[in-house]
Image (cartoon, rainbow, N blue to C red):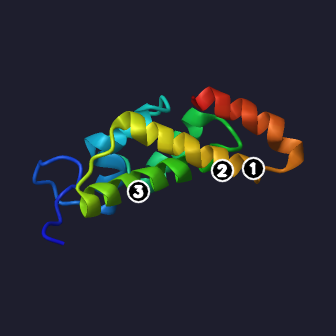
Amino acid sequence: MDSYNCAFYISGQEESVHHLFWECTYAQQCWGTLDLQILQDGDTTQNTQALRVQLRSQFSMIAIILMSWTIWKARNEATFNNRLMSIQECKRAFLNELTKVSYRVKTGLSLLFDQWCQNLQ
């Protein structure tokens, strides 16, 4: 790689795991599409817990994992293909991943999961 700086914004900010998922303006906007707020001074554990509280669902970790995955894929798209996904594209990619997960939900939880998914849209 030519640079270790943040792939999303030319700020000279060195990319780290913490920056990528929690500090980066792009990531914060992605989380914001789900009406979630990141703790400004929180570490990964604190932010994950805060997101779980905000989501108030037994499925909260699914949303956290999928949005993290989506941010990671967007970062790779910017790094390796020089293409910045819009925040709307990030949300659509997240919802696409969520749809894939919905096919694997146990029958007894599928109605509850579908209702929860509707709230995220």
Residue 23, position in %: x, y?
Answer: 29, 47
For label 1, the crowd category at 10 Å Cα-Cα, with few meaning under 14, some 14 to 19 and many 20 or more, is: few
Residue extending farthest to the right is 108
Q: Nearer the viewer, residue 40 or 55?
A: 55
Which label was assigned to residue 100? Answer: 2
Q: Quarter of the image holding residue 96?
A: top right
Instruction: Answer with left or right where residue 106 lies relative to residue 87.
Output: right
**Disc 1 to disc 2: CB gap under 8 Å:** yes
Local SS, label 1: loop
Residue 119, position in %: x, y?
Answer: 63, 27
Pointer 3 or 2: first along the chain = 3
Q: Amino acid at mark 1?
A: Tyr
Which quarter of the figure is the C terminus placed in?
A: top right
Q: Amino acid at mark 2?
A: Lys
Q: Which residue position holds label 3? A: 73
Q: Amino acid at mark 3?
A: Lys
Residue 5, above or below 102:
below
Instruction: Answer with left or right where residue 114 lies relative to residue 94.
Output: right
Instruction: Answer with left or right where residue 6 lies relative to residue 93.
Output: left
- Which residue shows up at 48% across the image and 55% down it? 69
Q: Which residue position holds label 1? A: 103
Q: Could one spot residue 98 in this view of the protein?
A: yes
Q: Could one spot residue 37 in this view of the protein?
A: no
